[in-house]
Image (cartoon, rainbow, N blue to C red):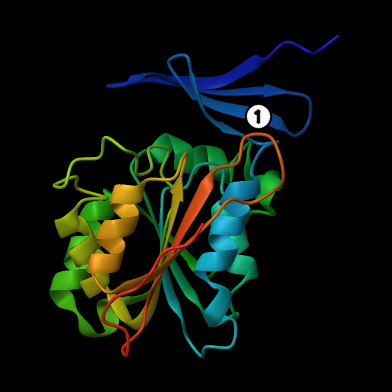
Amino acid sequence: MAQPWKIIESIPTSEGLLELRQRGERDFLIMVGSQVLMNSLANRSEVVLGQLGCLRLKNQERPRVLVGGLGMGFTLRAVLDSLPDTARVVVAELNPIVHGWCLGPLSALTKHAVSDPRVTVEICDVAQMILRSADAGGEERFDAIVLDLYRGPHAKTEPNDPLYGRVAIENMRKALMPSGVLAVWGENYDEGFDKRLSRAGFLVSTHRPGRGGLRHVVFLAELRPDKKSAGTFR
């Protein structure tokens, strides 16, 4: 018989009650209202997202990476494991309570990823951080931007969406180094987002990690100085 869930902490938000629940040693849920945002036992796509986003940076001298959304820290852990000791990783997380959970009850799940000396966590809107980086340019740009937000791009995404719309993609392109990489988690494949990335000059591929069952999507968009447009495959 399955153990009952225990509520570790909850906090009201504009979208409903945000809760951290636990049963057993490593089985956690983050929920908002009745919706499960993250399950600690189902993190395959988050891990692949972090790995693909930083695949080309392992041997770079001082790569700078932006992670949008902290969640339970699995994407951050995969990012750190793919980077050298000299890397700098900035995490943009909207909710300070999530940061606290990753420092506390969730920390052992990711070998204390948030406490890694390479990591700086900023409590802010990742879209605003991207815009600041795009406007500043130069050394404020990133070698990779990894977006692990619980609402990924989808068929109803508006062209002016602050994260996945045309202007947002242009901001991300400007916030990246000339050969930078953008990796984005999605619940399902979104053709419109794919096309917007290609039109912005990214070489786009999509990946569905694992075999069978629910398989989320990782959009991988690479900037290539010699590429003006790119094709898409699944």
Residue at point 32%, 90% (across, down): 226
Q: Position of residue 149 (x, y in %)?
A: 41, 44
Q: Secondary structure at mark 1?
A: strand
Q: Residue at x 59, y 65 (%)?
A: 51
Residue at image location 46% in from the left, 81% down from the top:
63
Image coordinates for residue 164, horizontal then vertical, percent: 26, 50
Task: State which quadrant residue 194 falls in.
Answer: bottom left
Give the image quarter of residue 174. Answer: bottom left
Q: Quadrant of the N terminus?
A: top right
Q: Quadrant of residue 152?
A: top left
From this view, report whether residue 4 is shown above or below residue 180: above
Which residue ends up furthest to the right in the rendered image? 1
Q: Can you say whether 42 is above or below 81 in the image?
A: above
**Residue highlighted by disc 1:** 28
In-front residue for pair 183/101: 183
Residue 182 showing in the rendered view: yes
* Residue 49 location (% of width, % of height): 54, 57
In the image, 185 versus 22, the foreground residue is 185
Is 205 placed left or right of 73 in the picture? left
Q: Relative to residue 211, is residue 157 drawn left or right?
A: left
Q: Amino acid at mark 1?
A: Phe
Residue 189 or 29: which is nearer the viewer? 189
